[in-house]
Image: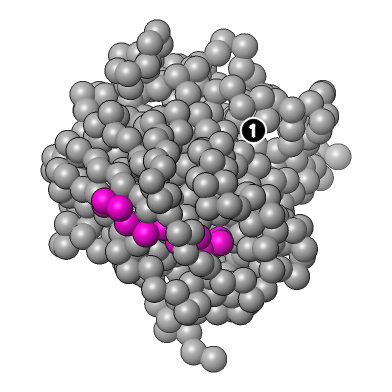
Amino acid sequence: MANKAIWGLSLALILSVILSSCQSSSSGLDAALQSISLEDFSHNVQILSSDEFEGRAPATPGEEKTVTFLRQEFENLGLKPGNGDTFFQEVPMLKMKVDPSAKLRIFKGNSTLEFNYGDDFMAWTLRGVDKVGFTQAEMIFVGYGIIAPEYNWNDYQGLNVKDKIVVILINDPGFETKNPDLFKGKAMTYYGRWTYKFEEAARQGAAGALIIHETAPAAYPWGVVRNSWGGTNYTLETEDNNMSRCAIEGWLTLEAAQKILAAAGLDYQELKKKATKRGFKGFPLNLKASLNLKNNVSRVVSKNVVALYEGGERADEVIIFTSHWDHFGIDPTIKGDNIFNGALDNATGTAGLIELARAFTQLKPKPKRSFLFLAVTGEEQGLLGSQYYATHPVFPLEKTVAVINMDALNIWGPMKDITVIGYGLSELDKYVEEEAAKEKRQVNPDPTPERGSYFRSDHFSFAKQGVPALYLSPGVDHVVHGRKWTLAQRDKYLAENYHKPSDEFDPNWDLSGAIQDLRLIFKIAYRLSQEETFPNWNEGTEFKSLRDKMMGITK
Ligand SMILES: [Zn+2]
């Protein structure tokens, strides 16, 4: 017995020596996982979403407080500056605010319709100019405003929209018809996103582009449109001062659009039906529009926070965690509570970065590859900070192993599952599946692909450049309350708090689900850090050729 015990002990010793020489011992991993702390996480969410941080708008005192806090946290954990000798990457932006007294006027013969900024339409410019507009410009209805050769679709076919105003439907024909053979059926394609529609209208030379808002296909109510663009708007500063963009971009409420179309003798629902048919062509509405905006524009510099935890063996190979620190700041035109605290969106993800950073510093030996903790600015304004990093990377993209994004973590408690937004796109799914399986958790695709979530957060800026990017979202099957309850909670948040001043920290939140997810993310990232291979996009995805090219992979 004694001999056997000694033999057993020495075998265990030998094994543990062998194991610890190639990877962190399981107790080391456990210690790292345990260092992801509910108390610290909750505390940091509360700090970041406090009124003192003023809603964390770019280039405001709220930014200064936010990025200083993050730098200090990363520094205290022993991380290094991620951009040479600094923890910051400067992001040059135009900061703009439209005078809300603007009126949209529509002319039909002698009669005029007049619409109010905010209640009936939202409009802005991305051009860095202080006055912009159009007078008595011709209006053209362009259906979904999509040119998609791969779907054999062109709403602009044979149309000249130069210097005209295009009126556009939101989402894509697949969403409207739920026909799986049309675009991607119910799931939104990038062509369904407003960002694409404004980009395409600019390429076509339109002076103005107005999207008709409808809650279901847009995936959010008018209040979100109003709040998102009603305050200060930001865009990346470009060499041409953004003069290649349309003079004016904006949205119409459904009611305003219906009135405008009625003036043209058209019915919105019928028109929408026609626009979903292949071969649909845009046409002039025989209406004219005037809209002039006074634009208070300034040049500002906002900051991405970049903190590095260097790997022990292949420090030049980097895994990036992204989370946007920014939110909408303060809107002085709102009566009562006018601070957009952005507690869920995205104080949670930002606080998550700190927890992950702490966990990785606990590992001995150090992980082989490096980790970059990238808290980006300007996400709410169109993924600006991540777009800037992805096009001005500190670490070469071909040495960037993967990006893992966190935007709005789980506030509803432990789940039996985890959601992969953009499931099926890359080999990173396999890591999630294998690690989740060890916890007996299921991996689900996005339950609401029609919302286009894959295009709506910072991982997408990296995907666009070809870097495999993973976006995990909370599960939808609560351990106690189940699936229906969870989906209802999500919808409630979306309707009541999303992008509103009421997105505030709530002591009733159950953040243990966020901790569960952060530990899963840690395990996925740890595995990536120990490997020598680089994950890729799956065959047939739109991003794979970019990755192959940067990695020198030829077929
Ligand atoms: Zn967000």
Residue closest to the far right = 1
Q: Quadrant of the C terminus?
A: bottom right
User: Mark 1: which amino acid?
Assistant: Gln
Q: Residue at x 41, y 65 (%)?
A: 200
Picture coordinates of residue 350, whole percent (x, y): 42, 33
Picture coordinates of residue 481, whole percent (x, y): 81, 24
Q: Nearer the viewer, residue 279 or 503?
A: 279
142 in the magenta segment: yes
Q: Is residue 387 left or right of residue 177?
A: left
- The image quadrant that residue 150 belongs to is bottom right
Q: Nearer the viewer, residue 223 or 476?
A: 223
Residue closest to the far front = 110
546 w.r.t. 393: above or below: below
Q: Is residue 407 left or right of residue 302?
A: right
- The image quadrant that residue 317 belongs to is bottom left
Give the secondary structure at mark 1. helix
What is the magenta range?
134-147
The residue indicated by pointer 1 is 516
Q: Residue at x 61, y 17 (%)?
A: 509
Q: Residue at x 33, y 25 (%)?
A: 329
